[in-house]
Image: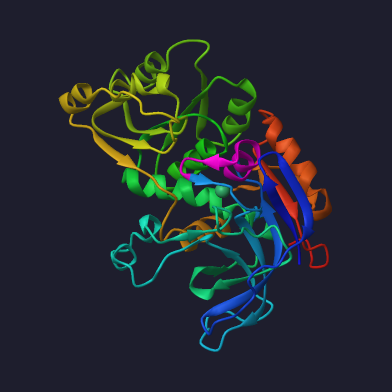
Amino acid sequence: MKALVLERVGELSLRDIDLPSDMGPDDVRIRLHTVGVCGSDVHYYTHGRIGDFIITAPMVLGHEASGTVIETGARVTHLRPGDRVCMEPGIPDPTSRAARLGIYNVDPSVTFWATPPVHGVLCPETVHPASFTYKLPDNVSFAEGAMVEPFAVGMQAAKRARIEPGDTAVVIGAGTIGIMVALAALAGGCARVLISDLSETKLAIASAFPGITGINIREGALLDRVLAETGGWGADVVFECSGAAAAMRDLFRIVRPGGAVVFVGLPPDPVAIDISGATARECRMETVFRYANVYDRALALIAAGKVDLKPLITETFAFPESIRAFERAAEARPGDVKLQIRIDMESEAL
Ligand SMILES: [Zn+2]
């Protein structure tokens, strides 16, 4: 089967490779349609590692995927061949302690597409547990289906924040995940979201959505702007999506007394945070690692028209152009929110 293979750092090829194709009774076989290019895929390509996960053997990239079911295992009842679907890329051990607690995203034995040594799905076909495969509503396209994975991170952040109706949120960092978090926060009940970045291009893309206001931190401190916008009180929820050490300094002054700071971005090194400042206001702190139990809710919001991810798809490449898509993604153009690769050219666009 032809797949996009990361051979070693900086070297991709589109070539035949043997991939597991055995079906169990609880699995479905899926013909892939669209796969998004994620920051993590690009990071493996440019750096060969993320933290302790290191590329030591050729690996197929891609984990943000949608497709069509072409075969179902004997025990699968909620899906049929022909169903359009999207998939959760992380497969936990369903008998693990974490899975039984409902926090399967932090199951130490979870396997996750395109995280070494597990292959991803930039290839024509894959086999996946039916229980982590979700039927797309008729009005949700394959392209939107492949956006559910990054949006799920936003959903998890909104859930962890325990938003109340009418909250004001601040999102620090207007990258792809920052925008996903802002949209999920609005869908989750926030009245408005103030989003900050250094890039005017990124802020313009984010602020095109109703309810989102961009703040360029080149023009002044975020803290001053947030206090001015909230009558000196602070934001109910602050989502830290930049991972930048400099962004941590004012976090517990940007948030209101008793508010929540949700850490989404990953600083490459340990950073200092103001525990006394947090304590003096009794702020709640939350962390986000991937997501659990949010895919069906994400699809419900998209199908209901409450979240529109389509404007975030910057460009779609055909499968034979996959390497070019990754070279483009590695350029990190500020106007590129999501690049996608279309694998299946035969099924309809929707
Ligand atoms: Zn991703």
Q: Quick one: which residue is furthest to the front in this view?
A: 56
Residues 78 and 163: in front is 78
Residue 47 drawn in magenta: yes
Residue 290 drawn in magenta: no
**Quadrant of residue 256 in the image?**
top left
Residues 321 and 194: in front is 321
Coordinates of residue 334 in the picture (x, y in percent): 66, 28
Coordinates of residue 28 in the picture (x, y in percent): 59, 77
Residue 163 in view in this figure: no
Q: Quick one: which residue is furthest to the bottom in this view?
A: 74
| Quadrant occupied by the C terminus | bottom right
How has the structure been colored for display?
rainbow
**Quadrant of residue 142 in the image?**
bottom right
Q: Residue at left 53%, top 85%?
A: 25
Asked if residue 141 is positioned above or below residue 275 in the image, the reply reads below
First to last magenta residue range: 40-52
Indicate left or right for 65 with 170 as reference.
right
Q: Residue at left 47%, top 48%?
A: 153
Residue 106 in view in this figure: yes
| Quadrant occupied by the N terminus | bottom right
Coordinates of residue 124 in the picture (x, y in percent): 74, 65
Q: Residue at left 57%, top 30%?
A: 207
Residues 298 and 105: in front is 105
Coordinates of residue 241 in the picture (x, y in percent): 45, 33
Query: Is the magenta region chiefly helix, strand or loop?
Result: helix
